[in-house]
Amino acid sequence: MTAQEFIQQLLPMSIQNIAISLYNTNLYHKRHTGIYASMREYYANCSRLSAGEIHAEQQRKLAAFLKYATENSSWYAPCKGLELEDFPILEKRNIVENLDKIATIKENQAIVNLTGGTTGSSMKVLYTHADMQERFALIDTFRATYGYTLGKKVAWFSGKNLIQTRDLTRGTFFRDDHINRIRFFSTFHICENNFDAYWRALTEFDPEYIVGITTCVYDLCRMALERNLELKGHLKAYFSTAETVLDVQKEIVEKAFGCPLVDQYASSEGAPFIFQCLHGSMHIHPLSGIFEVVDERMRPAREGEILVTSFTTHGTPLIRYRINDRLKLAPDDFVCPCGSCFPVVEHIDGRATDFVLSVDGTRIASGNISNCTKGVEGIQCFQLLQDRQDEVTVKLVCSDRFDTLQEMKFTNALRQRLGSGMKIAIVRVPEIPRERSGKFRILKNSLAV
Ligand SMILES: [Zn+2]
């Protein structure tokens, strides 16, 4: 039995809360010690630099990082050039199969991070403590622009399963860290039957900030609005993590919580960051790394797949890493009213594999599919599955209000996007399971792997 299982299964809840508080305090200490404070200052100051100064600093960090990788990783040792183009593209399977060659540190010196691979297999990366501290300095500097500081009341909806069977019967779906004032909610049990318990626990806690996996939080917000409930309290911002936010999710979450949804792009394997500014634009943080946008033939483009080089991955250097996400850059002449010179991204499509392939071969992105429910009543959630190019199955969870007329509206909206040659089968189901990570996927496409 692991320490965590022991805590979860055998100790009373009050003791569990203390154990979680101490565990977190220790974790917080590791993340906020070392270079954390100096990095906070560094990133706070960089907002005052000119575009030219930022570019020079980015190039300096890039050269230092590439040099470090060639000197410390046997995978990169053969790369003699110091230009980014001299380095090979790094695929996910390279990391899965060759971590010992790529990593520059041993597992016992590292913060080990496990993340889901494309095939469902788990991928491991090793972080140095300094890199983790710098990443938290970056995130905390970003959140500080929304008034957040360490110690303010936060509700977390994370992908960790914290809850045991006996909690389910009691209707308790959270754990409290009283020292750091965090309430951790399970994202695995959000459903109609548990709604009241979740909403009560959230209202009574009255957080100033919520951090969460949006597909899960979205479900909770949708159920709240169906009951004419909106969160009343002191909430200032909702920080979305770990996935692309769809327009419909943003709208529902902002309405139910009565605060802005603030988006960011990051990944657990250590990609550089894209943060949303107070004016709603998504800005690449140029001192966190490089985003190369490329087309199907790996040539530079304004829109397409991205290769990331991340300056905070000294433990497992990510250089030109094919992370399987896509983005579109804003036009060069776009100037954000916030005044930042950091490049703006028009949209991020999330996984490059999150699309439907139409009969004529066009890729239809998930954002375009999710808005099919606009103006259609009674759909609680749906998932589109594609195993053949001329056929999709749409699993649907719906209420009584989803009648023949609503089904026709929904099918028409899908047909408009997928083309008349696509066979569409609608299947009503009682529920749609989430992925092991706790995320909900609106598209599952076996043709894209
Ligand atoms: Zn801006």
Image: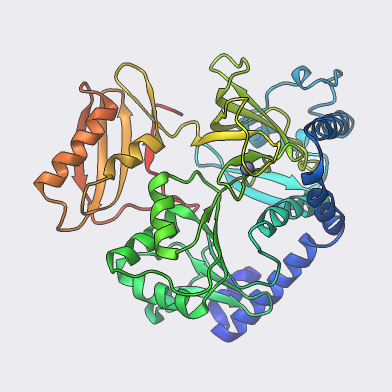
Above or below for 175 versus 263: below
Above or below for 194 versus 102: below
Q: Position of residue 123 (x, y in %)?
A: 62, 42
Direction from residue 188 to residue 36 in the image, left or right: right
Colour setup of the view:
rainbow
Above or below for 345 versus 380: above
Quadrant of residue 256 within the rendered picture: bottom left
Toward the viewer: 396 or 287? 287
Q: Residue at x 22, y 47 (%)?
A: 376
Toward the viewer: 49 or 28? 49
Q: Position of residue 61 (x, y in %)?
A: 84, 35
Q: Residue at x 46, y 29 (%)?
A: 449
- Which quadrant: the N terminus? bottom right
Quadrant of residue 223 within the rendered picture: bottom left
Q: Is residue 172 visible?
A: no
Direction from residue 160 to residue 49 in the image, left or right: right
Q: Residue at x 32, y 37 (%)?
A: 385
Q: Residue at x 44, y 64 (%)?
A: 257
Q: Residue furthest left?
A: 404
How many circles with numbers are drawn on the protein?
0
Q: Position of residue 293 (x, y in %)?
A: 61, 25
Direction from residue 16 to residue 22 in the image, left or right: right
Q: Classify the position of ligand 1 by quadrant: top left, top right, bottom left or bottom right.
A: top right
Q: Position of residue 299 (x, y in %)?
A: 62, 15
Q: Is residue 123 visible?
A: yes
Above or below for 179 versus 112: below
